[in-house]
Amino acid sequence: MEATIEVTTTRFGQPETVQVPESSVMTFPDGLPGFDDVRTFALIEEEDHLPFRWLQPTEDSSIAFILIDPTLVDPTYHPRIDLSSSRTDQPQHQPSPQSSPRGRGSYGRHECELTVLCIVAVRSENDITVNLRAPILIDRSRRVGKQEILTDDRYAIQHVVNSPGALAPGAMPRCS
């Protein structure tokens, strides 16, 4: 059985402690824009709330980012992502003609499984947007992540979700 850690979150407005597999704890060496000092996050994935996931800092329960597979809101989502970084603490991916969003937001398997997710903003039940311009990239095999800021203007910072209920009836996250 995989080891777990306890993470406190306020994703539903009230503090709660959840058990997260250690393999779901990721290091973001550069933090996230605006949260540069926050480097360790738990990726919370619960069947009851799919297709939504939460990126929860392990040290700060007051912050939680709602994430979703971008292909669920834009089936044509296929950004050009250059991860030819020489840094060893960043997600790594071997470029391939097969590199496109597949399945649950993963790019093709090469040295790792690179998961691509995007941040969701919920202002109200009928006002939901997804930031397709700055995807979260997670290298699950190395447990590192980063937020990639795309220069491709085909993708909006506030992509409107026209039919929120179609994503996961009864599982919509509440804004707090």
Image: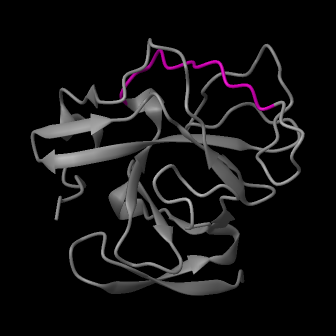
Find out whether residue 78 is within the magenta segment: yes
Residue plotted at (83% across, 23% down): 95
Residue 10 appears in which quarter of the rendering?
Answer: bottom left
Residue 156 appears in which quarter of the rendering?
Answer: top left
Residue plotted at (21% across, 39% down): 128
Q: Is residue 136 above or below residue 156?
A: below
Kindly report the secondary structure that dominates the magenta region of the rendered protein: loop
- The x and y percentages for residue 166 are 23, 35
88 sits left or right of 164 in the view = right
Residue 4 appears in which quarter of the rendering?
Answer: bottom right
101 sits left or right of 110 in the view = left
Residue plotted at (53% across, 77% down): 58
Nearer to me, 127 or 148: 148
Residue interval drawn in magenta = 73-83
- The x and y percentages for residue 27 are 68, 64
Find out whether residue 175 is within the magenta segment: no
106 sits left or right of 150 in the view = right
Quadrant showing the C terminus: bottom left
Residue plotted at (68% across, 76% down): 22
- The x and y percentages for residue 70 are 45, 32
